[in-house]
């Protein structure tokens, strides 16, 4: 294969020692990230988040700072530390923008430095996924809403829509570039299809890893409450394109169209219930034999198993004589699976190069430094062969929503989900939108009523 880095044997042993000492103690080079993320998820479930937040902040100086900051911002928000979450998400967006600037100078994602060639993909700094970035903007908009900052929320909804457009434009070019590099290196992704049958099944449940109907829906409801009916219709229609069988979304499009055309004069207000159910499943590791010029080499890859995915279970909402159930608008697991599937060609190239580099390193260690050095390098190759299982794991498994149209005034909203329920008082303003956010990471249902918008007329 082309592009295999030639490293002197003495440097190989120095690098092996350094990475072993460093990697065993930090990041995900040797410790699978899902094990780390269990700490953040358990902290949310048992209400003991202080220690987790401190640990995440300490790791925000690591190469994986983007991942840890996303987890931290999510924990802060779900424990109603809205100001802290808002500031942490700002740091997240700074890192994404820094990554955008650096990407303009990179020719390809397929290659990697010497350290990652001799360890695993976890040695490459975490750069995030488009679907994570879009969720971050959606969550930031909710932070602004919780503070009553409607202008800030409006900016975040616009940024979320822009990020989706930009990501869609870049997606095809990134895939094409990775596939071209794969052809150059003689790597045919199709020969590995059977190893990723579970991933392919999971990814097939969604049309896009980027377009987020939940974010579009909340944005549409927000804009409808501000009287921006044309923008609201655009957002509702985009959500409907991703969920064409949704009668709720079809009705929403029709309602804001009638408002825009002056055919509806309504004294009622909109109550939108956002429901975030469970946690997105982690990746799993599989081993695949990769052919090299030296023979076959077993390489670790990340994948998703559809058996890990949960079924969306709706939240029942009742108030003012109306009853609705939430609809699953964004199945996060399948979105994550599709995002991973689209990166497979680039990953296969890196893994093929890595297999050749590791075999060559072992061979040179034997030739130049003797059998013990070769044995040490062989053990290191086995220990360091770990799949990249990093992803934002405090995201929900299913992002859902529904809405009720109620007369102006105070209403008792009854929420019922499998394993938990709540009753909250909700202020409804004529012509405006009130957001109610329900989150159920485990059995407990957490509900937060965000400040109601003012009347738009």
Image (cartoon, rainbow, N blue to C red):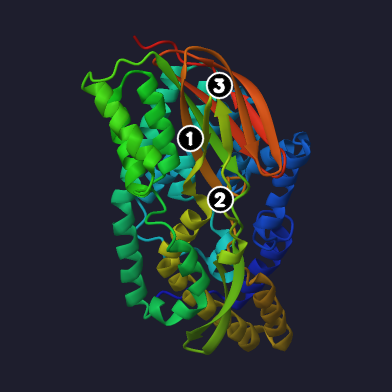
Assign a secondary structure to mark 2: loop
Quarter the N terminus occupies: bottom left
Q: CA distance from mark 3 to mark 2?
A: 24 Å
**In the displayed structure, would residue 298 be above or below residue 50?**
below
For mark 2, what is the residue?
312
Q: Earlier in the sequence, mark 3 or mark 2?
A: 2
Q: Nearer the viewer, residue 156 or 197?
A: 197
In the displayed structure, 110 sits above or below 373; it is above
Of the pair 278 and 151, the residue shown nearer to us: 278
Which residue shows up at 41% across the image and 69% down it? Answer: 345
The residues bearing labels 1 and 3 have C-alpha atoms spaced at a distance of 15 Å
**N-terminal-most mark, 1 or 2:** 2
* Category of crowding for the residue at label 2, using alpha-carbon neighbours closer than 10 angstroms: few (below 14), some (14–19), many (at least 20): some
The answer to whether residue 96 of the structure is visible from this angle is no
Residue 113 pos. (x, y %): 50, 63
| 102, 142: nearer the viewer | 142
Q: Nearer the viewer, mark 3 or mark 2?
A: 2
- Say which residue appears at 65% left-offset and 56% top-offset: 33
Residue 159 placement, left or right of 23: left
Q: Residue at x 47, y 75 (%)?
A: 353
Q: Is residue 457 above or below residue 405?
A: above
Q: Which residue is mark 1?
A: 402
Q: Quadrant of residue 372?
A: bottom right
Between the C-alphas of marks 1 and 2, the distance is: 14 Å
User: Mark 1 or mark 3: which comes first in sequence?
Assistant: 1
The residue under label 3 is 450
Tell me the element at label 1.
strand
Quadrant location, the C terminus: top left
């Amino acid at each position: 294969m082309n592009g295999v880095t030639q490293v002197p044997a003495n440097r190989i042993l120095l690098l092996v020692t350094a990475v072993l000492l460093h990697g065993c103690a930090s990041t995900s080079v040797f410790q699978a990230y899902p094990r780390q993320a269990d700490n953040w998820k358990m902290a949310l479930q048992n209400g003991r988040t202080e220690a987790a937040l401190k640990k995440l902040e300490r790791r925000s100086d690591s190469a994986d700072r983007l991942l840890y900051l996303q987890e931290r911002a999510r924990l802060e928000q779900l424990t109603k530390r809205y100001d802290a979450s808002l500031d942490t998400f700002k740091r997240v967006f700074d890192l994404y923008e820094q990554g955008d600037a650096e990407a303009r100078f990179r020719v390809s994602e397929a290659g990697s430095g010497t350290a990652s060639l001799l360890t695993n993909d976890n040695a490459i700094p975490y750069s995030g996924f488009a679907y994570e970035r879009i969720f971050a903007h959606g969550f930031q908009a909710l932070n602004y809403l919780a503070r009553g900052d409607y202008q800030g929320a409006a900016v975040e909804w616009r940024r979320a829509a822009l990020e989706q457009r930009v990501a869609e434009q870049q997606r095809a070019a990134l895939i094409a570039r990775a596939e071209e590099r794969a052809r150059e290196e003689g790597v045919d992704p199709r020969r590995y299809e059977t190893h990723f049958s579970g991933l392919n099944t999971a990814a097939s449940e969604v049309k896009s890893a980027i377009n987020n109907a939940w974010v579009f829906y909340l944005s549409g409801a927000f804009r409808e409450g501000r009287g921006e009916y044309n923008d609201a219709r655009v957002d509702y229609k985009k959500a409907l394109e991703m969920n064409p069988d949704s009668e709720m979304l079809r009705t929403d499009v029709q309602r804001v169209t009638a408002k825009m055309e002056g055919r509806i004069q309504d004294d009622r207000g909109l109550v939108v219930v956002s429901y975030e159910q469970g946690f997105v499943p982690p990746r799993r590791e599989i081993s695949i034999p990769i052919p090299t010029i030296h023979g076959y080499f077993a390489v670790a890859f990340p994948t998703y198993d559809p058996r890990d995915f949960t079924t969306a279970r709706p939240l029942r909402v009742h108030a003012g004589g109306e009853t609705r159930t939430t609809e699953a608008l964004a199945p996060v697991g399948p979105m994550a699976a599709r995002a991973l599937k689209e990166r497979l060609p680039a990953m296969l190239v890196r893994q093929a190069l890595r297999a050749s580099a590791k075999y060559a390193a072992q061979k040179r260690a034997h030739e130049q430094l003797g059998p013990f050095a070769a044995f040490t390098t062989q053990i290191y190759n086995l220990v360091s062969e770990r799949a990249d299982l990093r992803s934002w794991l405090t995201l929900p498994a299913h992002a859902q929503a529904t809405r009720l149209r109620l007369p102006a005034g105070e209403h008792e909203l009854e929420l019922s989900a499998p394993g938990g329920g709540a009753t909250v008082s909700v202020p409804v303003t004529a012509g405006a939108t009130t957001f109610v956010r329900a989150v159920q990471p485990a059995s407990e249902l957490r509900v937060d009523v965000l400040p109601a918008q003012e009347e738009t007329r």
